[in-house]
Image (cartoon, helix red, strand yellow):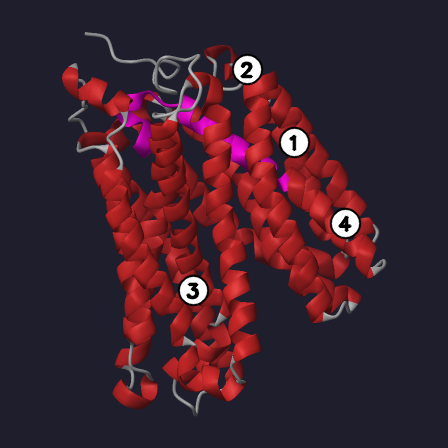
Amino acid sequence: MTSLTAEQGAAAAPANRPLNRDDYKTLGLSALGGTLEFYDFVVFVFFANVLGALFFPPSMPDWMRQLQTLGIFAAGYLARPIGGILIAHYGDILGRKKMFTLSVFLMAVPTLVIGLLPTYETIGLAAPFLLLAMRVLQGAAIGGEMPGAWVFVAEHAPAKRYGFAIGSLTSGITGGIFLGSIIGVWLNSVYSPAEIHDWAWRIPFILGGVFGLVSVYLRKFLHETPIFQEMQARKKVDRELPLKTILRDHREASVVVALMTWILSTAVVVVILFTPSYLQKVFHIAPAVALKANAVATVTLTIGCVFWGWLSDQWGTRAAMVLGWGGMAVTAYLFYLNLPGTELSLIWTYALVGFFVGAISLLPVVGVRAFPPEVRFTGLSFSYNMAYAVFGGLTPMLVSVWQQADVMAPAHYVAAMGVLGVAMGFWPLAVKGWVAKR
């Protein structure tokens, strides 16, 4: 028996039907879980200073506590490839739904535990080690969540709504960043610094953990994907180690996804995460103004994820890549070259580049199609997480060093990735339907 092709498994049949009630339920619950899981992962950084003060010895210098705390944060990124590969391995063998639910559980429990952990004052050196252990579990969970969510939704969606479904899901995931920011602003507005230090810092972690467990329960109402059910019926669930198959037969597809992950990680890390600090340090923009502009850009990024996914359905993925990532290159220069500007110009140019950064949703649109269903979860997870661990980790350091010689370094780097994205639209393997398919 022959296996399903990448194109056959890209979305559920029939291709021409509209999204129905079950599709919207699948999309809504998947996006909600992704939002909460990404919130749980990034909320750590919003309270890094408080955690550093509470979980390390008071006698330790401030810079050392900050370094140790950021090291624990980075451990989550280092754990992503391991968790992603393990979860994806069983997702290709045991089913998408089981691993999709497990990834949320593995994020929710450690987040809840962090909110309940005793501090250094209570248990000494055990406190930072427990914090590290919880962060590693979070990293493993996020490594499986994003690829798993993309595969799960793509294999449910009708082909004509494939890009819109994946774009909507991706917008939900990026919305987790915005949710974490809003919770941080709310907490600092309602409670005093002393109250946050004493107990209120626990609130965002406990809330994230509780709502994550609710999401675990809600995902029980989702159904296994039609593609995996068909593989089971045809007895085509591959018992060979999926990663072995990927490394032997799908190296080219892995390169495509890795390069597109480089674009995604640059866009998110530089434009969304790195730039607020850059605005304050290089152009002396007030923190409140920089964060306000960043919040608006995060909203337009979320909207952009849906738009560029929808456009790939209407005009084809190649056209969406050329317009989306080409626009990101142009608007990056428009934004950074006009700094510091006025508050109004800062907000609208930041919002504009944020909208084009939403073209990151085209990575899963292409990436899911790039692998056959039997090893799809593993192929996407392995390529995405390994590339993100490398590029996501190196990009902040590279840009920080580069900007010492040229303050426009962020613009050059983001624009270069935009050009790469346009070039990826004309990848020779487009004939296979990964890119050109409408």
Identify which amino acid the numbered label 1 is placed on.
Gly
- Quarter of image, res 276: bottom right
- Check disc 1 and report the residue beneath it: 324
Rendered location of residue 134, percent (x, y): 30, 65
The residue drawn where x is 34% and y is 38% is: 148
Amino acid type for the residue under numbered disc 4: Trp
Regarding residue 380, the answer to whether it shows in the image is: no
For marks 4 and 2, give the CA distance.
Answer: 32 Å
Q: Which mark is residue 422?
A: none
Residue designated by label 4: 348
- For the magenta stretch, what is the residue range? 357-381
Q: Main secondary structure of the magenta part?
A: helix
Question: Residues under labels 1 and 3: Cα distance?
Answer: 31 Å
Q: Secondary structure at mark 2?
A: loop
Furthest-front residue in this view: 21
Residue labelled with disc 2: 436
Nearer to us: label 1 or label 4? 4
Question: What's the distance in space between the residues labelled 1 and 2, CA to CA?
Answer: 15 Å
**Which of the two labelled residues, at mark 3 and mark 2, occupies the earlier sequence position?**
3
State whether residue 87 is above or below residue 44.
above
Depth check: 359 or 160 in front? Answer: 160
Q: Which dot, 3 or 2, sits closer to the camera?
A: 2
- Which three-letter amino acid code belongs to the residue tagged 2? Ala
Q: Tell me the mark number nearer the camera, choosing from 1 and 3.
A: 1
271 displayed left or right of 170 = right
Residue at label 3? 73
Expressed as whole percent of the image width and height from the top left, the position of residue 239 reads 15, 26
Q: Secondary structure at mark 1?
A: helix
